Image: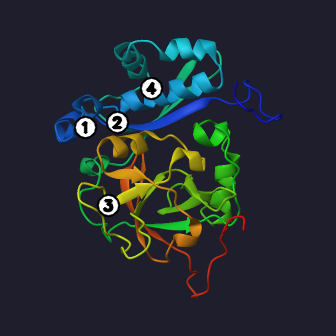
Amino acid sequence: MASIPPTTSSDSFQIISSLRYDPAIPRAIGERTAEPCLLGTPYYLLPYHRDRLLNAAICFNWAKAIEFLQQDLGQFTRILDTFIPDKSESWRLRIVIDSSGACKVEANPTVSMDLLKLLCPTEEVSQLNTWRVYVDSEPTTPSDFTTHKTTARGDYTAARHRSGILSPQEQAEVLVINPKGEVMEGSITTPYFRRRRHGSEKVGTSKDSEPGWVTPPLLSGGNAGTTRRYALVEGFCTEEVIAVADLVDGEECWLSNGVRGFIPGRIVLMDPKGSERSHFHGNT
């Protein structure tokens, strides 16, 4: 049984997953992945989104939602199709499922983008459209509501406000930190950092056949995201605990989510005046 805070009943939150619908995805990138079934559909990483919702329903012991999400992927796709206002346009979709198994999809217009950004990065971080990546100044306690994506997102909203991110349109993100001082995830993205090395090996180097990027393990308390799963399957990254104390001001990183794909980022530990921003270092 899931550990639900006393103030949160199964009737007061829903499980959610957000993704991009774009009719150009299959012809643009459908043959550029090791798993064509993932990107051969206008719904970006749809099988992973269905799995993510199902795992959340299992966690919260929502029998009717489990039954709904265990249906054939083709039937699930046909249900989603009914919510698309115009299949010739691109949409930001938010799938919302409640404890009774009722499903609704919120569709909002989204800007056009280079669809190759939906693929795992294959080159160095670009300076173009790089997001500022802050570190939260207060810890967030891991729970079922950080492992699974739900409408109970107060911790994430608070983290964004503490970092001064007041609009979803800002090219900025904040890293959510657990009480141990480990990076859990971003408030709306999965983060990836250059491989950490200890001893004589330098940061950024990697052994043969090992990815050069790492993402926090789920044991640190973050969300089991769809692009995170994709990045691991494709071999872009491996898992590694990321301590806040090891982050370096100005270091490059990547971010990803199911709507925007992969986004270049840069860690910001100093404010514009040159003084260190307040951020949480964890228990000592």
* Disc 1: which residue: 25
* Disc 2: which residue: 44
Residue 234 marker: none
- Please identify the quadrant where the N terminus is shown: top right
Mark 2 secondary-structure assignment:
loop
Horizontal relation, residue 199 to residue 39: left or right: right
Viewer can see residue 97: no
Which amino acid does the dot numbered 1 rest on? Ile
- x 21%, y 34%: residue: 26
* Disc 4: which residue: 50
Q: Sequence-wise, which precedes: disc 3 or disc 2?
A: 2
State the CA–CA distance, disc 1 to disc 4: 18 Å
Which amino acid does the dot numbered 3 rest on? Gly
State the CA–CA distance, disc 3 to disc 1: 27 Å
- x 62%, y 13%: residue: 63
> Of circles 3 and 4, which is in front?
3
Which amino acid does the dot numbered 2 rest on? Tyr
